[in-house]
Amino acid sequence: MVFTIWTNYFLPPAANEIFDRGVASHRLLKSANMSASNLAAGATDQAIREAEIIFGQPDPAALFDLPKLKWVHLSSAGYDRYDRADLRKSFAERGAVMTNSSAVYEEPCAQHVLAMMLALSRQLPQCLDEQRGERSWSAAKHRIESYRLTGQTVVILSYGSIAKRLIGMLEPFRMRVIVVRREVRGDEKVEAEPIERLGEVLPLADHVVNILPGGEQTRRIMDAKRFLQMKRGAKFYNIGRGTTVDQEALWMALGSGFVGAAYLDVTDPEPLPPDNWLWSQPRCFITPHTAGGSVDEFEQLAGHFLNNLERFSNGRELINRVI
């Protein structure tokens, strides 16, 4: 079966070659406004009206009046701008579906969090600062401030694909893992609590890992109240969305030492302005939204879409369906 596929996502040459070769038997329409960004919906064009399948980051408003649309595949793991009741209703009425690219990003994102957890536990950022600074030999200080992850408690805000992969990576450390999600379904492989009990769960954590999506329901969910509910000295990690954190409250909690350290891969806004106070907070460690990156990221994106395209063509269940 031949489908009309519309895309507004710019792929580098190697990945684009894989993509074009994989859709060669279909009708491919490329937007006049291509974009390589996953952080914002791209501009659209009239050709989208012919689309049966969409790959990339379409404007949510453009998805309502597309009578031929059968399937949208997002080039990102995040889909908060599409997680709307009116859009879900519209898709349900047409029998359309939406998938994302969590399968591409779950491995690097989970490894990124684990890397920072291990780095903080073994005082690696502090030792690097010392090497690049005064080059003192603070062996006694770093040894006594190092700790083992074994036996500690991790609270993960989310139970999506990234969270599940991180849970698997934490198993060898014999940590207690508790996930907090909107609805506890009973199929979780670790302890699970509903979001309404977040205040009761936070005091248990040595590490709080935030992988929540953006949106009004999660906006600044980690505020001053929540940071004060954490165990004194606990570490906070955010690889979800910057809008889920009250950054001024986090800065104050770090300054007082109540939060032992924070690792942020996402901020609000992005890029984080050079004069933002978080850059100069010694307990805060920042990476510029790189957790999902890898040398073959775009080839993986193209391959994931093509795998789902083959499944769609044969009436099989799609991977990473979100709507």
Image: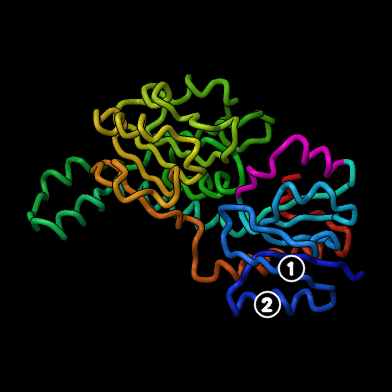
Q: Quadrant of the C terminus?
A: top right
Cα–Cα gap, marks 2 and 1? 9 Å
Residue on which disc 2 sits: 18
Report the front residue among 305 and 59: 59
> What amino acid type is highlighted by mark number 2?
Ile
Q: Quadrant of residue 260?
A: top left
- Check disc 1 and report its element: helix, strand or loop: helix
- Check disc 2 and report its element: helix, strand or loop: helix
Viewer can see residue 310: yes
Q: Residue at x 51, y 57 (%)?
A: 292
Report the front residue among 133 and 138: 133
- Image location (x, y in percent) of residue 89: 82, 37
Q: Quadrant of the N terminus?
A: bottom right
- Image location (x, y in percent) of residue 38: 58, 56
Identify the mark nearer the N-term, 2 or 1. Answer: 2
Extent of the magenta region? 78-92
